[in-house]
Image (tube, rainbow, N blue to C red):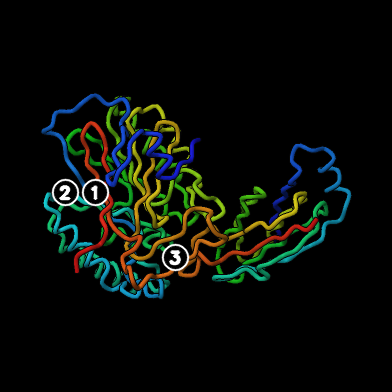
Amino acid sequence: MHRRTMIALLAGSALGAARLAAETPAEIRISAKKFEFHPNQVTVKAGQPVMLVLTSEDRIHGFKMPDLGVRTDIVPGQETRVALLPTKPGSFTFFCDVFCGGGHEDMDGTLIVEA
Amino acid sequence: MLQSDRRDFLKLTGLAGVAFTAGLFPNQRARAQANDFHFVQFSDTHWGYSGPANPDAEHTLEKAVATVNGLARQPDFIVFTGDLTHTTDDAKQRRERMKRFREIVSALTVKDVRFMPGEHDASLDKGEAYKEFFGATHYTFDHKGVHFIALDNVSDPAAKLGDEQLAWLAADLKQRKTDDRIIVMTHRPLFDLQPSWDWTTADGAKAIELLMPYSNVVVFYGHIHQEHHHMTGHIAHHAANSLIFALPAPGSQSKRAPLAYDAAMPGKGLGTRDVTMTDKVTLVELPVTRS
């Protein structure tokens, strides 16, 4: 089963939406398990569309990246797809927001958006 | 929304000092002195934690109990705002920790003790073990004219109060007058304190919206392991120190890792809180002093 979560980060921008539709996004796969994301550091280019493909190896985890307005569950046996068009360079933290045990608070990673 | 640290908050209220006294019931008429009382807040005791952030973890809770038992004026009651125990995947060990925690706090001189869960107690089994030992995860009670509401924002591992509990809260508030004194107690901040550290409640804004029509509301919570004060409109939110380790100020560093243990000051950043209720609310932070 494929679970599709499409989030355009140029929300409100017709140009951004058109661009997201026109270009093939780079697919980045991130797997989750207690208590880590793999990879936990992802580098992308500003202005280039990205498709995060999120999977879980063990149980339900969360994927939250507040600075980019992203929040979704990651359910075992499903691929959760999150479309991004990051425009602002910087480092953005993502983390699990579904409490999963003793190492939950350390289950995080960084999206680096290069200029 | 106004964000304020302690200093800003003191400026806001025009008061300063060791005791944190503020006009926290801004529209409250003076009450008869006979109804004045105080209670003590414990939070984030994390019984069962073992690690370098607190080499004295096996004794800190007992010392805090002794400290509160030594207060010259004993409180009317005591509240624990969550994370009574440190989480474990082992359901049997979770219950053993809760049992031992309950044994330790049974030494409190004051026997009117109110508990609520934190995510370490309740998020892995939706509060099942917690309820066996401590009862309901959300409830109300009244004391000398003040209405207390304990909210559960941890039994759902996604940190939600949930529609059912919000409806329960709305129904309870409908029975209150808009100038009633209301104390809300919960574990996680109801407002977005630091979303990048997950210091939020997913649907906490809905609870605050329900509380906004009431002019005398104060919220006490834990989770962030430090004293912190914040206003959402006229509602004051006060976070308490932990009894296991301190965490950094919101957003002050990249990770919310525990602050390093200071062997020269082993109780630094830890403690309980005394809350005195008159026509004002006065907070006094109590360091762990007894052995």
| CA neighbours of label 1 inside 10 A, class few (<14), some (14 to 19), many (20+) | many
Disc 1 residue type?
Answer: Asp
User: Foreground residue, B229 or B173?
Assistant: B229
* Side (left or right) of B270 relative to B146: right
Q: CA distance from mark 1 to mark 3?
A: 24 Å
Distance between mark 3 and mark 2 Cα atoms? 30 Å
**Residue B84 percent location from the top left of the image:** 32, 61
Same subunit, labels 1 and 3: the answer reads yes
Q: Marks 1 and 2: in contact by CB < 8 Å?
A: yes
Where B47 falls versus B220 (above or below)? below
Q: Secondary structure at mark 1?
A: strand
Query: Which residue is labeled 2 in the image?
Result: B75
**Helix, strand, or loop for circle 3?**
loop
- Of badges 2 and 1, the one in the foreground is 1
Q: Is residue B44 above or below residue B3?
A: below
**Residue on which disc 3 sits:** B259
Q: Quadrant of residue A110?
A: bottom right
Q: Is residue A67 above or below residue B34?
A: below
Amino acid beneath label 2: Pro
Q: Nearest to the eye among marks 3 and 2: give it.
A: 3
Amino acid beneath label 3: Leu
Q: Position of residue B291 (x, y in %)?
A: 19, 69
First along the sequence among labels 1 and 3: 3
SS at circle 2: loop
In the image, which disc is placed on residue A56?
none
